[in-house]
Amino acid sequence: MDIFFLQGFENYSIWLFQFAFAATSATIVAGSLAERSQMRAYLCYSFMLTGFVYPVVVHTFWSVEGFLSPFNPNPFLGIGAMDFAGAGVVHMTGGMTALIAVMILGPRKGRFTDERTGEPIERPKRMKGHSMSLQVLGTFILWFGWYGFNVGSTYTISSAKSATIASLAGVCTTLAGSAGCVTALCFSTFKTEKITGETTFELVYALNGCLSGLVSITGACGLVEPWAAVVIGFVSGFIYFYSSELLVKFRLDDAVDAIPVHLFNGLWGMLCIGFFASPSRVEQVYGVEVSGLFYYDGASYDGSLLAVQFIGILFILGWVMVLMTPFFLILSYVGWLRADPLEEIVGLDISYHGRSAYNMEWGRYEDGEAPAQEHKSNGGDTVGMSGTMGMSGDVVVSLDEEEIEDVWDE
């Protein structure tokens, strides 16, 4: 309590840095729950995650008093669990929370069931994002920000040693992200061509593969050699592809594939340290003599670091499950989790914020009436449509019941 609300605490740069990490863990969950979660649910879980879940995890791994921290004077098994920039602390924490929330919340309407009858459908419906341009832009913004997280986790560049660590983190971040991008894109193209006979380069796999590579290298970026970063990113591309398919197989609806990207690749990011950690790099960062399993010390292979990393993974998964599972169950029970079905159909932007995210109006008319429009259905028949200007200038389109049935039949 000595530094409650930053009383007597003057290292504001560390506070601001950790604030960004905590916020990131919460935003991971937001993507998975998109299009069907109530606004109050976002506020509640963000408070719970950043106030009670994340602080315990970050204290355990990065505080000098944390029992799994390599900075502890007496680290666990003499080593401590290593996570340079938050593959487990940030990404696994957010990803596991997202998985719990998705399981309790349920899928979007029409994702795994028929929208009209509610009956399960054999082939799940893919709900693609509305703008690939914005997805590409968002990915590049994230990639750029990742250098602040990974390189910034060096905290200072006041000596040749810290400068070397920071530059290595930047190089490994670049290589792993690139490797994950290319791997996911090429493998998805290969699979699609094998199934359909057509060569299709699906850009969404490149984008999420890139993010997967960045997540997987986050914990190891200052602890591995550049060649290992390429291998780590390469594996992350496959992990993303198959974990994404696994969610669909179990009919879990993750709107943006945040769980495959952050949970599964965050887990890989923790494990890969136990395989690829370079003894010289580990000594440089933590001052201990230990290496990954793939480094031969002349007598035997040392698996102690891998064991500690695995224990660290179990701690994160267990802590998040114990706190967030009952939390989301309570939110669901009191009716604060799932949005109303009608609000979900209309769109949560209009339901919760009073307007659409995009201006779709046809034009402005002094009398508030939009002219009658004609709409051709797939069969070529003309269906009459009339529209009135709604709130914020939106056009509300109405169809007669018989005309709606005709469109559905077509």
Image: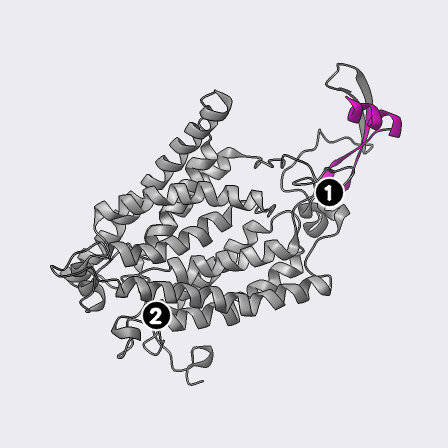
State the residue in front, 100 or 386. Answer: 100
Outermost residue, front side: 299
Image coords of residue 76 (percent x, y): 31, 74
Residue at the (55%, 55%) spot, across then down: 99
Please say whether residue 406 is one of the residues in the magenta stretch.
Answer: yes
The answer to whether residue 68 of the structure is visible from this angle is: yes
Report whether 259 appears left or right of 215.
Answer: right
Up the image or down, 78 lies above or below 82; here it is below
State the residue in front, 299 or 403. Answer: 299
Up the image or down, 251 lies above or below 312; here it is above
**Residue 7 lies in what quarter of the image?**
bottom left
State the residue in front, 113 or 105. Answer: 113
Image coords of residue 193 (percent x, y): 45, 24
Q: Label for residue 42?
A: none
Outermost residue, left side: 298
Task: Say which residue label 2 marks.
Answer: 62
Residue at the (45%, 32%) spot, across then down: 203
Kind of residue at disc 2:
Trp
**Residue 218 lies in what quarter of the image?**
bottom left
Residue at the (44%, 27%) spot, across then down: 201
Q: Label for residue 345?
A: 1
Are discs 1 and 2 less than 8 Å apart at CB?
no
Residue at the (67%, 67%) spot, across then down: 330
Bounds of the magenta span? Answer: 385-410
